Amino acid sequence: MQGEDVDRLVALDAKYFGSSRFRVLKGLFEAASHHCFVAQHGRDLVGYVMGREVQNAFWIGPWICEDPSISEKLLEACISSINNEDMEVRGGFPALNENMSALTRERAFELKEKSVRMVYGSGGHGGISQGVYGIAGPEKG
């Protein structure tokens, strides 16, 4: 991922999360750009993943992908960017995304805790779970 890609992925991210999160995405990119990757079909952006080190672990997310066949490649790229192979890999992976559920089973991720995604108000866009493979964190979405 390059700096200019952040501007491009905001629209894709908003489609799946329900609103623009430009400041969050830019901040995550600036903090750990070497753990951030994009996927394209031609010139069209179809997915991205961001990772970062957190409290003696590596967090994967946010992670959005429109094409399930590419989602695993994004995961592999992000994991391969980790310098410490003993580091625990964590993420907030939505259970409603059936493709993500299959990936976590194949990769032997262990469920530690569950959370509920909520939307305030009835007029808002709650996002689309099927393209969300990972969240930035419980505090960020």
Image (cartoon, rainbow, N blue to C red):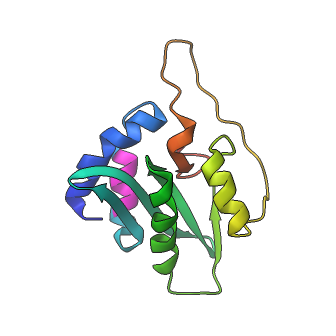
Quadrant containing the N terminus in the rendered view: bottom left
> What residue is at 65 percent from the left and 46 percent from the top?
98
Residue 18 lies, with reference to residue 114, above or below; the image says above
Can residue 93 be seen in the rendering of this structure? no
Instruction: Write the start and end of the magenta stretch as one range.
Output: 23-29
Question: At 78% from the left edge and 58% from the top edge, which residue is drawn?
Answer: 111
Q: Nearer the viewer, residue 100 or 89?
A: 100
How far from the left and from the top, in percent, is residue 140? 52, 45
Q: Quick check: is 94 in the magenta stretch?
A: no
The percent position of residue 139, horizontal first and vertical second, equals 58, 46
* Residue at figure coordinates x 34%, y 46% from the top left: 23
**Observer-nearest residue: 99 or 114?**
99
Q: Nearer the viewer, residue 62 or 76?
A: 76
Q: Quadrant of the C terminus?
A: top right
Whether residue 74 is visible, yes or no, is: yes
Measuring 61% from the left and 51% from the top, which residue is drawn there?
Answer: 99
Q: Quadrant of residue 106?
A: bottom right
Q: Main secondary structure of the magenta part?
A: helix
Relative image position of residue 128 (x, y in whole percent): 52, 33
Q: How many marks do you count on the picture?
A: 0
Q: Is 27 positioned to the left or the right of 8 in the image? A: right
Toward the viewer: 30 or 116?
116
- Relative to 60, does residue 137 appear above or below in the rendering? above
